[in-house]
Structures are given as C-alpha cells and as structure tokens.
Amino acid sequence: METMFQLHQPHLDIKFISYFSPKPVIFFYQNSLSMTRCGMTMSASSFPAPSLSIGYFSLQFVDDQICKSFTLDNIRNSLIQQEDSIIFSLLERAQYSHDSCAYDNDAFFLDGFKGSLVQYMVLQNEKLHSQVGRYNSAEEHAFFPEYLPQPMLPHLQYPQVLHHCADSININTQIWNIYFKDLLPKLVTARNNDECGSIAVCDTLCLQALSKRIHYGKFVAEAKFQDAPSEYESAIKAKDRKLLLELLTCETVEALVKKRVELKAKSFGQVVKIDEADNVANSTYKIKPSFIANLYENWVMPLTKEVQVEYLLRRLE
C-alpha cells in the first residue's frame, strides 16, 4: 500500500516570540493542522492545549520583538545556558573510555557508508534533524552539510538577524579535529570495553553542543558591531584581524567565564559520598573542574573569536 505523508501548513496567529533563549521557542495559536499518513489523521484536537510550543527546531518569524531581544546581554544569557549543555554532555562522555573501535575509519560498513561508528552516528543524526529543519536555523551547523537531505516540512522563514555572510562560515572541521585529537585524550583513558554505541552517542552530543556555542560568535559579533559600527568598520575595511581581535576581546569577561564554568563543573560533577554518620567525604569530581576552565580558555573562547573575526571581515560585503 502506498504510504502518504502530507502536511497542511496552519494559519498562524503569532502572539509571542523568544529567539535568543537557550532553546528558541515560538508560541502561537493553531487554527488548523492535519497530518495524514497511511490513512491516519491527527488534527489540532490531538494536542493537549490550543497553543503549540515548538522548541529546538522552532518556527521563527520576523517580529518587532526579535529586534528588541537582539542585545548582547540576551546573547550572553544564552551562552551561559549553553555552558550547562557542554558540561553535562562532557560529564556523560567521561563515563566511557577512549575506545579505538569507535574511531576506526575502516571498521564500519552500512548502507553504502564506510567510516567510523562515530562518523556514522553524527551523519545519520544530522540527516534526521535536517529533515525537520534544524539546519535552516542560523544557530545550527552541520558537520556533514554536503550529505544533508532537504527538509520534509514546509519551508519556514527564519528571521534574518545576521548578515548573509554568516551562511558561509562553518569551522566544524576544526572543532572535530580538536575534539578528537586534543580534548578527548585529556578527558578519558584509552581502553577497549565494547561500549562503542554509548561512546558514539555521547560524542555526538558533545560535538553539537560545542559547535553551537562556538558558532554563536556570529551573534556576538553582530551585536557588538551594531553597538559600535564606526569602530569596527575601519578595522573591517583595513582587513585588520589583529585590531578586530582586540576590539572583540574583553579579558575581564573571559576571566569571569572561566571562573563560572569551573564552579559549575564542581557543582555538576561532584561525586557525593556520605558515611553512616552523615559526614560528607572529601570532594571528588567526575571531571577535574580545571579541565572545563582550560577547555574554555584554550579552545572554546579562541574558536568563538575566530568565528567573530571571520564574520566581521565579511560584514560589509
């Protein structure tokens, strides 16, 4: 029997938009929505409430509230929330070893694919998410963009808050190489223990969290440019990378970020042991808190500034 999949785009009565939040959301009233698949229909009555909230893969529309929320403070609030995602994903990854079987480029064959299990996991995850529009958002960047299918859902118009040059900036190749060559060997020990599936899932989450945080530099750069366009325009016209980096760098803020993520790592990653007398043993941690601080100092913040500089150099095109 022929399988049918139809989407009827609802008439949307936009009420509220929040774009620069940890997980962008839009709230709207749904007047009509039906999905037909193999003769089965879901209508608006299938949902528990008359309003529908779409989070991670959010519908977003140009609105005055977008402009009001596009501030450096709001962007920084989102970056602070993303710190939690990075730390929690690394805590999950720290449970497992560095199993060479998960990273053997000649070990995995399936559906015409040849590569490592981790590569396969990331690629298939991105293919699935691409079909529901994840990579239409300026916040999301794929590691294998050349293999992504077109979204199945109706085309959605995202707000154009960034200069069009943002679409051409993707440093996921660098992030991938740094994660596997520099970060993982410092986080986990090498040991083959037949947990490749769990390792691949955790690596996927870590890579995506790091990629989103680093590429958020585009939003930071745009907000800083709008705050002081004359200062940045002269440096951009002169193609002065060093000056742009100086304008973008705030050592006080960076020091606070390092301190905050280290404290979060202590809080989130503490192993709590209590004896029979309810005495708490000496604190131990799943990840050394200093590891997270060094991660931000040596990789996350420098790569974020690299994205910012690349974006600004093309900002006047």
Image: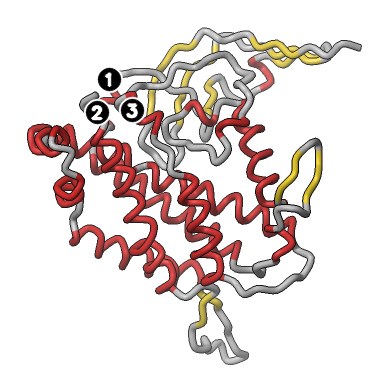
What residue appears at the point 53 percent right and 51 percent down from the top-left corner?
207
Left or right of 139 in this view: 135? right
- In whole angstroms, how far apart are the C-alphas of marks 1 and 3? 23 Å
Q: Nearer the viewer, residue 102 or 47?
A: 102
Q: Position of residue 210 (x, y in %)?
A: 47, 51
Badge nearest the viewer, 2 or 3: 3
Q: Measuring 54% from the left and 54% from the top, which residue is drawn there?
A: 206
Tag 3 or tag 2, which sits nearer the N-term?
2
User: Mark 1 belongs to which amino acid?
Assistant: Asp
Of 180 and 223, the residue lying toward us? 180
Query: Can you tell which quarter of the image residue 129 is in?
Result: top right
Mark 1 lies on residue: 64
Q: Which residue is mark 3?
A: 165
Q: Quadrant of the N terminus?
A: top right
Query: Is residue 178 among the parts visible in the rendering?
Result: yes
Q: Which residue is mark 2?
A: 68
Q: Secondary structure at mark 3?
A: helix
Identify whether 58 is placed above or below 271.
above
Label 1 crowding class (10 Å Cα cut-off): few <14, some 14-19, many 20+?
few
Q: Nearer the viewer, residue 20 or 176?
A: 176
Q: Position of residue 246 (x, y in %)?
A: 16, 52
Q: Split into 4 quadrants, where in the image is the C terminus?
A: top left
Measuring from the top left, give residue 20's x and y in whole percent. 36, 36
At 52% from the left and 7% from the top, the residue drawn is: 11
